[in-house]
Amino acid sequence: MKLNRFHNPKQFYDRVQNYLLDREARHFSLIRTCNTLINNPKIYKSTYLATVETQENIVAVATINFPYHLKISQVRDVAALEIIARDLYRNFQQIPGVGSFPDNAEFFAKKWQALTGKSYKLKMRTRIHQLEQVEKIKCANGSFRPATESDRPLLINWMEAFQMEALGSTQEDIEIIVDRFLAQKSLYLWQDKIPVSMLGGREATPNGASIAPVYTPPEYRRKGYGSAIVAAASQMLLDKGCRYCFLFTDLANPTSNHIYKNIGYQPVCDWNDYRFE
């Protein structure tokens, strides 16, 4: 097996597209990463795009957009994970963490610890879900609308609160993240006289859309706003021609998992994130 590094996101995606699309729901986050880099090649200060291949086939795909975690696709041979770990160690010495399917993520984390001596800790257990049809739910008071530039100060506050709650820290400049969403016209609000919930949603794969982030401030929770905005955004994206909507749920939050199930989201597989100390 041989590791191949790519510096051109378009060339990388051309190479890995068929491999990732073979299991589109499982790989929607990696496909979304490729599309983001193709459309905004200078969006991150540093990236890592790699495949491990035999003479005939791709065995594994790996990406990093620093400061985010390494993402690893489904792999056909776990030996590919050690090849990726050794290449990353030679070129970067340290990475913040790894996200992948549970066995892959843990295997890589152990290999990284053996190479670097750095311990690892399970940061989050999530589950990938897919929706094809929105189920009818009891609708909350209010209405769904696109976020606009006038909402920017509120969106910045809510985006920071979301990252602190979901991730424990802010990963990037929050203003840059919000401005990116606004430029893409992919940030939405549920309004009940005033904004009460926020959601990001956009086309992410050839057949599907990504829902993230979803955030309702604590004072507005348990009123159905989160369910309402997810259902409305999912239906909007299906109406635009997407066959599926994809999202991650935190397995430590049974309430949100129940909400998404009621809307029509079905579990596909689990995805674990490990942080390197």
Image: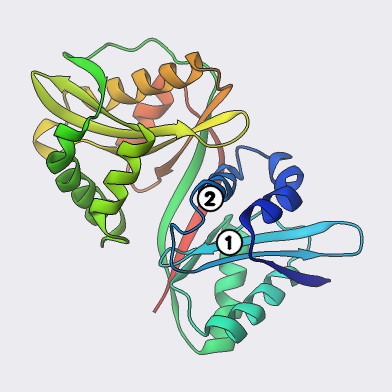
Question: Where residue 78 sits in the image (x, y, percent)?
Answer: 73, 67
The residue where tag 1 is placed is 63
User: What is the three-letter code of the residue carrying label 1?
Assistant: Thr
Q: Residues within 10 Å of mark 2 (few under 14, many from 20)?
A: some
Q: Which element type, helix, strand or loop, lies under badge 1?
A: strand
Q: Quadrant of the C terminus?
A: bottom left
Q: Is residue 4 above or below residue 211?
A: below
Q: Is residue 74 at least partly visible in the picture?
A: no
Residue found at x 55% / y 25%: 244
Residue found at x 53% / y 52%: 37
Q: Quadrant of residue 122?
A: bottom left
Residue found at x 34% / y 25%: 230
User: What is the three-letter code of the residue carrying label 2?
Assistant: Thr
Question: Where residue 176 sits in the image (x, y, percent)?
Answer: 29, 53
Question: Which label's residue is closer to the chain start, 1 or 2?
Answer: 2
Q: Which element type, helix, strand or loop, lies under badge 2?
A: helix
Q: Is residue 185 above or below residue 56?
A: above
Marks 1 and 2 sit apart, C-alpha to C-alpha, by 8 Å
Q: Identify the residue at the far right of this view.
A: 55
The residue where tag 2 is placed is 33
Question: Where residue 227 sits in the image (x, y, percent)?
Answer: 30, 24
Q: Are marks 1 and 2 in contact (CB under 8 Å)?
A: yes
Left or right of 54 on screen, residue 264:
left
Q: Quadrant of the N terminus?
A: bottom right
Residue found at x 48% / y 50%: 40
Question: Where residue 135 sits in the image (x, y, percent)?
Answer: 43, 13
Q: Residues within 10 Å of mark 1 (few under 14, many from 20)?
A: many
Left or right of 153 on screen, residue 162:
right
**Which of these two is toward me, 196 or 5?**
5
Q: Is residue 106 above or below residue 124?
A: below
Q: Quadrant of residue 154?
A: top left
Q: How is the image coloured?
A: rainbow
